[in-house]
Image (spheres, grey):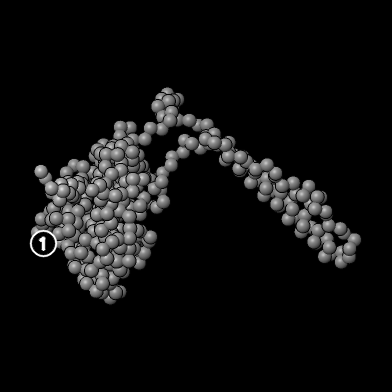
């Protein structure tokens, strides 16, 4: 017969071997794996003050050359082409004076027709300036694959906050990636870092460009053995996955576009004046009436004060409040915005910056890093 102590030991052993469920916020996470992943992501370091320190110390004095070296917490941080290439895993090995195919052909004429045919949807074209020179593309006119490569370029290679339009130099880089041209990405990133460092200080440099490449700079700091806090202060953006691509990299379908296109094709160019939005027209009329009433009121006040000054007596009496309002006749009913007006307007959420690259002006302007 088994003793009580032996049975108790068995029960105790069975209890201790049982898996204890991980406690997590069920309203915040879908499961324990995701909660553990969140904890591990907290350790990733993006520190704004170190980022600003890097960009500030990378700026040389007026009489000194650009050294491609900064300082963070007193430690030198190299950010030339070779240093960045090591961070990227050395994807491209080049000699001392050797250039990749992209930078070798950078000064040559860009084949705009080939870029247009490869990047744009059927029926779309490049936007021209008043002189007829190709100037920019529109992201919504690009194929899904071209939009995805553009997203890679504007996020990790040549960061820009303005993403709805694509200047010719950026489109040239997207086309080079799409056609498998050999590209020294580290050289491009190094020169982008230099442009951010000199932003607002040199003629032609961008004024308020964002402090780009935070993760890359943190990696350079870690490689230089800079002591950083264990937790960062900036939220890591969500990944670019299939869900993101299906939502943001698909061609836009505008309401009634097919009917409008067929009408334009059959009727030819229209010579009639475009119809003004009723709400905009009401606002304009209201503003004009208000300004006219204000002018009448100011003229009446001026005339009254002038008469009082010339007469020098109380013979002239000012109008009462009711008479003054009746004479000015300000409009009373303000225009009411109705739901759905202007719904066909494009809602570009990224048109906050002006294109900072002129057509062809920066071709081959990248300096040796």
Q: Quadrant of the N terminus?
A: top left
Identify the element where label 1 is drawn. loop
Q: Residues within 10 Å of mark 1 (few under 14, many from 20)?
A: few
The residue wearing badge 1 is: 96
Could you tell me which residue is drawn at 23 percent across and 59 percent down?
Answer: 216
Drawn side of residue 181 relative to residue 291, left or right: left
Drawn side of residue 254 relative to residue 341, left or right: left
Q: Nearer the viewer, residue 27 or 63?
A: 27
Q: Nearer the viewer, residue 79 or 358?
A: 79
Residue 142 seen:
no
In the rendered image, the residue lying farthest to the front is 1
In the rendered image, the residue lying farthest to the right is 315
Could you tell me which residue is drawn at 16 percent across and 48 percent down?
Answer: 4
Could you tell me which residue is drawn at 11 percent across and 60 percent down?
Answer: 97
Q: Position of residue 152 (x, y in %)?
A: 26, 47
Q: Quadrant of the C terminus?
A: bottom left
Drawn side of residue 70 relative to residue 291, left or right: left
Q: Nearer the viewer, residue 134 or 339?
A: 339
Residue 233, quarter of the rendered image: bottom left
Could you tell me which residue is drawn at 29 percent across and 49 percent down?
Answer: 23
Q: Position of residue 202 (x, y in %)?
A: 34, 66
Q: Position of residue 140 (x, y in %)?
A: 35, 39
Q: Position of residue 89 (x, y in %)?
A: 14, 55
In the rendered image, the residue lying farthest to the bottom is 63
């Amino acid at each position: 017969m088994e003793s009580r102590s032996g049975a108790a030991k068995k029960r105790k052993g069975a209890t201790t071997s049982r898996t204890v469920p991980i406690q997590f916020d069920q309203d915040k996470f879908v499961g324990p794996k995701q909660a553990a992943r969140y904890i591990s992501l907290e350790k990733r370091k993006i520190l704004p003050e170190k980022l600003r320190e890097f960009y500030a110390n990378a700026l040389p004095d007026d009489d000194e050359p650009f050294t491609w070296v900064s300082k963070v917490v007193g430690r030198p941080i190299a950010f030339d082409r070779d240093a960045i290439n090591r961070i990227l895993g050395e994807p491209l090995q080049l000699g001392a004076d050797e250039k990749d195919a992209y930078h070798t052909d950078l000064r040559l004429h860009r084949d705009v027709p080939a870029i247009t045919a490869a990047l744009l949807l059927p029926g779309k074209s490049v936007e021209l300036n008043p002189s007829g020179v190709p100037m920019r593309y529109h992201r919504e006119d690009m194929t899904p694959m071209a939009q995805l490569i553009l997203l890679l370029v504007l996020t990790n290679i040549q960061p820009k906050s303005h993403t709805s339009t694509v200047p010719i130099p950026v489109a040239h880089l997207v086309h080079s990636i799409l056609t498998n041209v050999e590209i020294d990405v580290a050289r491009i990133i190094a020169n982008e870092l230099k442009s951010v460092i000199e932003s607002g200080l040199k003629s032609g440099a961008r004024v308020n460009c964002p402090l780009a490449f935070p993760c890359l700079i943190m990696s350079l700091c870690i490689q230089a053995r800079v002591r950083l806090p264990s937790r960062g202060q900036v939220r890591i953006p969500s990944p670019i996955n299939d869900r993101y691509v299906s939502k943001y990299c698909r061609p836009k379908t505008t309401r009634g576009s097919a009917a409008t296109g067929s009408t334009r094709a059959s009727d030819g160019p229209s010579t009639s004046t475009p119809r003004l939005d009723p709400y905009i027209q009401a606002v304009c009329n209201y503003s004009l009436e208000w300004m006219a009433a204000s002018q009448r009121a100011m003229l009446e006040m001026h005339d009254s004060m002038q008469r009082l000054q010339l007469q020098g007596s109380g013979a002239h009496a000012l109008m009462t409040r009711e008479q003054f309002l009746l004479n000015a006749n300000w409009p009373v009913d303000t225009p009411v915005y109705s739901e759905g007006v202007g719904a066909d307007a494009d809602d570009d959420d990224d048109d906050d910056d002006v294109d900072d690259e002129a057509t062809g002006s920066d071709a081959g302007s990248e300096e040796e890093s």
